């Protein structure tokens, strides 16, 4: 598990993640986006507890945090993107690749009525599927939003 912000910044660069992550971690980026998903704060406050109790993968790279309740990151061993609710003990895979990871986050923003925010930050995060996301959000009338979301995300590569 990464212990410092500098270790995370180095990993972002080494793994080839878009510069927006480093920019956000250094105080930049969209203020509107950071109201929803910001740099991890609580993670670094409780990382020792998480580590001692084996609650996250050993080589977990924290990327974003939502409301200090959910941490999103990259499991470097499985090479999958995951979310972990601090109040829960389960890790959920939300993407087998970077585009699926973004798709999961951006669909949730779209469901919250924040399509304009996705449009604002999509290019910064190098999301390749903005037109497809907008079509999905306009046409999605499935009664089970989670199933519908997963079908969309699985098509992102």
Image (tube, rainbow, N blue to C red):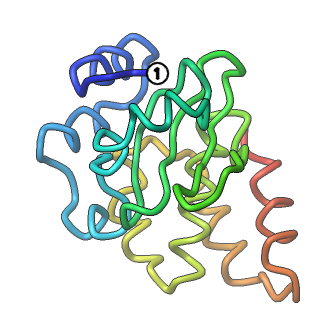
Q: Relative to 139, is 84 on the left or the right?
A: left
Residue 126 is situated, as x and y percent measured from the top left of the image, at 45, 41
Q: Which residue is found at the position 55% from the left and 59% from the top?
A: 105
User: Which is more toward the observer, 53 or 26?
Assistant: 53
Q: Which residue is found at the position 55% from the left and 49% from the top?
A: 102
Q: Relative to 137, is 53 on the left or the right?
A: left
Q: In the displayed structure, would residue 98 be above or below residue 68?
A: above
Disc 1 on helix, strand or loop? loop
Q: In the displayed structure, would residue 5 be above or below residue 16?
A: below
User: Which is more toward the observer, 107 or 62?
Assistant: 62
Number of labels in the image equals 1
Image quadrant containing the C terminus: top right
Q: Hey, which residue is sitting farthest left in the picture?
A: 27
Q: Which residue is found at the position 67% from the left and 22% from the top?
A: 79
Residue at the spot of label 1: 1
Q: Relative to 30, is 124 on the left or the right?
A: right
Q: How would you rate the neighbour count of disc 1 (Cα within 10 Å): few for under 14, some for 14-19, many for 20 or more?
A: some
Residue 146 is situated, as x and y percent measured from the top left of the image, at 80, 71
Q: Relative to 64, is 22 on the left or the right?
A: left
Residue 99 is situated, as x and y percent measured from the top left of the image, at 61, 41
């Amino acid at each position: 598990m990464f212990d410092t912000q500098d270790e995370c910044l180095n990993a972002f660069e080494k793994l080839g993640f878009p510069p927006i992550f480093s920019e956000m971690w250094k105080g930049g980026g969209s203020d509107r986006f950071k109201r929803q998903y910001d740099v991890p704060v609580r993670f670094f406050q409780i990382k020792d507890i998480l580590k001692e109790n084996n609650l996250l993968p050993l080589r977990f790279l924290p990327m974003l945090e939502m409301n200090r309740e959910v941490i999103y990151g990259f499991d470097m061993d499985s090479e999958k993107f995951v979310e972990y609710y601090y109040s829960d003990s389960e890790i959920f895979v939300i993407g087998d690749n970077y585009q699926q990871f973004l798709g999961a986050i951006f669909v949730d923003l779209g469901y919250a009525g924040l399509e304009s925010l996705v449009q604002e930050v999509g290019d910064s995060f190098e999301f390749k599927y903005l037109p497809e996301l907008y079509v999905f959000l306009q046409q999605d009338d499935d009664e089970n939003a989670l199933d519908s979301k997963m079908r969309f995300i699985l098509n992102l590569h």
